[in-house]
Image (tube, rainbow, N blue to C red):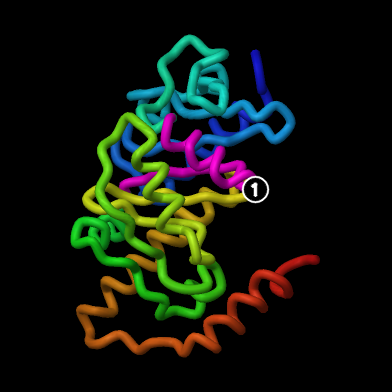
Amino acid sequence: MLLRQLREEICRLHAELPKNNLVAWTSGNISARDPASGLVAIKPSGLRFEELTPASMVVTDLAGQPVDGELAPSSDTASHCYIYRQMPSINGVVHTHSRYATAFAVVGESIPCVTTAMADEFGGEIPCAGFGLIGGEEIGALVVEALRGHRSPAALLRNHGVFAIGESAAAAVKAAVMTEDNAAIVWTARQLGELIPIAKEDIDRLYERYQNVYGQR
């Protein structure tokens, strides 16, 4: 089985999506790029998460053409591969329709940076891109364009959902989880009153500390 270890990893990571309430039924997907070969492992189209196995993952080239696996790859494969081609440092992409973040996407609104946790992880707002149809590279192009000039590892797609990226598939999953968590906080806070902004210089300090000091080094 080609890319066995990578397939095993993303199979395990797919379990994090329903566990964190980021997906419903068969929606959403994770892919990972193997830096050595450039090949991509991605969820097959239309399978429920509890049905996934390492062998069911599909391996494609960077053009999205299957090279190993018996099933059809995700309908988002072309967009995942577009992101990988345009962002060489990225090796993980996650797509979800998580409830609160998608609510922001449905009204075409970016998620403002009003929590210290969001400043830590995203270094600013989570931008909202335009609308694109599923099946080709258009969504990938919108994600790349939306993230240009942002530190955020995630973008919203209008009327659609969330795309998160990372240096690994695990990092991209973390970004997707944190996107939904902060979207829920911002939505809830708005029911209580006006949001209190964080000064840009404080966002910058928080981001720098979290990215370069926080945790084990």
Q: Is residue 85 magenta?
A: yes
Q: Amino acid at mark 1?
A: Ser
Q: What residue is shown at x 52% (from left), y 13% (from top)?
A: 69
Residue 18 showing in the rendered view: no
What x and y, as percent, mark residue 179? 42, 60
Residue 122, percent from left and from top: 51, 68
Q: How many marks?
A: 1
Quarter occupied by the N terminus: top right
User: What's the magenta region?
Assistant: 78-97
- Going by the picture, which residue comes out furthest to the top? 70
Q: Secondary structure at mark 1?
A: loop
Relative to 68, residue 33 above or below: below
| Front residue of 117 and 164 | 164
At x 42% / y 54%, what residue is drawn?
145
Residue 18 image-quadrant placement? top left
Q: Is residue 111 above or below residue 116?
A: above
Residue 181 in sight: yes
Looking at the image, residue 36 lies above or below residue 59: below
Q: Which residue is mark 1?
A: 89
Q: Residue at x 25, y 38 (%)?
A: 133
| Residue at x-position 22% and y-position 87% | 193
